[in-house]
Amino acid sequence: MRSTRWLTGLLVLVATSGCGGDEALAPTAAASSLKLSVVGDPEYLTGKVDVLFDAPKGSVSHVELDLRGQQIGVAATAPFTFTVDSAAFADGAAELTAKVILAGSGANAKASLEVELSNTPPKLAVISPVDGATVIGSPSRGFTVSPVVSALDGNTIAEVWAETASGNVDLGKGDGSIPVPLDGVGTDFPQAAVKLKIHARDATGAESTVTVKVVPSNVKSRFEQDTGGAVAPVRSLDILSDGRPLIGFAGSYYLLPQPSLTEKPSLTLDNVDALVRSGESLFFTTHDAAQTKETLMFSDLNGKMTSLFDLSLADQSTAFDPFLRKNGHVVASWVSTATLDSHVLGYGPDGKLDFDTLLPAAPLLDQIAETPEGHLVTMASPDAVASHVQPFDGTTGAALPAWAPPGGQIVLVDGQGVVLLYYTTQTYGTPTIHVASFNPAGVPQWDALVNETYPQLVRRLPNGDVLAYLFGAGVGEPSSLTVLGKSGQTPLWTGTLDEADYLLGEAPGSTDLLVSRFNTTTSTLSATRLGADGTIAWSTKLPGDSNATLQMLSDGSVLTSAPDAGAQTITNVLVDAGGKTAWSATFPGEKVLGAIEVDDLLIFASGSGDMTPFRFEARSRKTGDLSWRYLEGPSREVFGRWVMARSKPWDTVFGSLVTAKAAPSGMTYTTVTLGFVP
């Protein structure tokens, strides 16, 4: 066989005698040039072609023509012409062979002509993605597929490519190693199907095309759980290190497998009152169906469970929420309201008991805090005979000497001590609120009366002073900021703010506070940045009224979402950390329920409450431009709660929706958790 894939023109016949030597060849034939050719001398044989065998007149008495060893014609008289149906053979290189009997001598001769058959285009199949598949991606980052194709042809495959609006993409071997961007992907989701056209061409130029439809989506996964007649939006989301979400709602928790949330949960926990996770372990309090007992349970993430202790609710025993320490150990406590005995128990991440400390006749509040040196602090019930703060050694659980300030609530624990919030009563039904500070040994530092305003924030300033942000006591009453010196109870300064002020947060990288203000007299809304000494760094007027939602972002900028009820629109304004307006954008909706920062995007949930329709939108943090919008709603059958968590392995934001469905007995509800890829 020739090394080339085809041969054009004529071939000279090389003849041999039946005895195997040239000496038997007739002299007239030996001197002649015997020729085998295809009419038209085509580069490739397609369909029916005519093949000619030409020899000097009278030199040949019989000719048999074979293709790939299969006889396709016999001729006994000149002209020796044959019709060959090339389509009856597979494409690719082939050999035409003429078997000749020379006139007179009866000697045999044989000649060959190499040709290339080309009748069918490549056999092309798209193995992945399958037709109708969902392609996960992001409108902001793009949607791509990495096609896996099978392309077969006898003439060999010269090229496989995907056709896109921006040009062809060479797929190389078609093994899925080359990504292809999808065409025509908009900003609203779920999206309509998009066509993906794959081409293959063989060496002869014949081409095949296969088109599959795929559906681009930024919903990576979803989990649906029937809640019957109860409305139960997802209320908690915890993302494990490997990306698996632990979803909690309606007293149950579901650990979902990666990567598809449509599978059955790998772990289901029911009747859960409170839960904490320590690495790969779960500690949770639960009750039985009859609510006769409460149990602290330990479980690994494979569902192997151990009961740590049981309480009889008939004895009025109460288990408090487990507390997760910084070292991964867990503290639980329970109290018998019949005997007033309390237990504080410590557990390692493996569920083994570290300590069990008994406090006779000392009921505890449902509160545990941890000091920087690892001690544990809890508060005795205000109704106890001797209210006190009870510290414990965090390793042994041994009770340390108790403090005896007024009973109350621990609001701050740090290296400089403990700050408590407690109240007394001046007249019936009118509480008088105090903020008190104690050093780590329990020695009082100061005790400040803050009257009838309940602190929204208490924090320690870098110099040791304590700043208290106070709500106004009633309509028309201003809020205030008070800095309480660490050496005494006399305020270092008190700043009076406008009516209806709310704390947005502490400005990152500084001791400043960001506050929103709505002045009921002038009906103006503003954002204000305050220094720890009460000075105003800047104040910026904002659109909207007291119904506007304000949120401080991670860089200290302020996002305002102001609804216009009449126009059914929302105006979002971003004020940067310097008090300057960065952008303003208006879009349909009733109210922004929440926003989360994801890289350079702000993702919003808009609606008018937990039980009303809403939708998700992603907008550029820099410009406010719409990147994508998820249109699961609005619908009166779809509502939800804005609950989110980040999953680094999936780069996912989770939200919660509830779908209402009519049933003969009324309405049934399904909680749907959506995984968004921004």
Image (cartoon, helix red, strand yellow):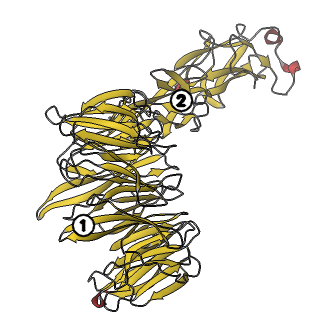
| Label 2 neighbour load within 10 Å: few <14, some 14-19, many 20+ | many
Amino acid type, label 1: Pro
Where residue 196 appears, as percent x and y from the top left, is 43, 31
Q: Quadrant of residue 523?
A: top left
Mark earlier in primary sequence (1, 2): 2
Q: Hey, what amino acid is under mark 2?
A: Pro
Coordinates of residue 319 in the picture (x, y in percent): 37, 80
Res 114 → quadrant = top right
645 on left or right of 415: left
Q: Pick the quarter of the image with the N terminus.
A: top right
Image spot of residue 289 (x, y percent): 28, 80
- Judged from the image, the secondary structure of the residue bearing numbered disc 2 is loop
Q: From the viewer's perspective, is residue 353 above or below residue 174?
A: below
Q: Which mark is residue 122?
A: 2
Image position of 128 with respect to 21: above or below: below
Quadrant containing the C terminus is: top left
Q: Which mark is residue 431?
A: 1
Is residue 188 visible in the rendered structure shown here? yes
Badge 1: few (under 14), some or many (20 or more) residues near its Cα, within 10 Å?
some
Where residue 545 appears, x then y in whole percent?
Answer: 21, 37
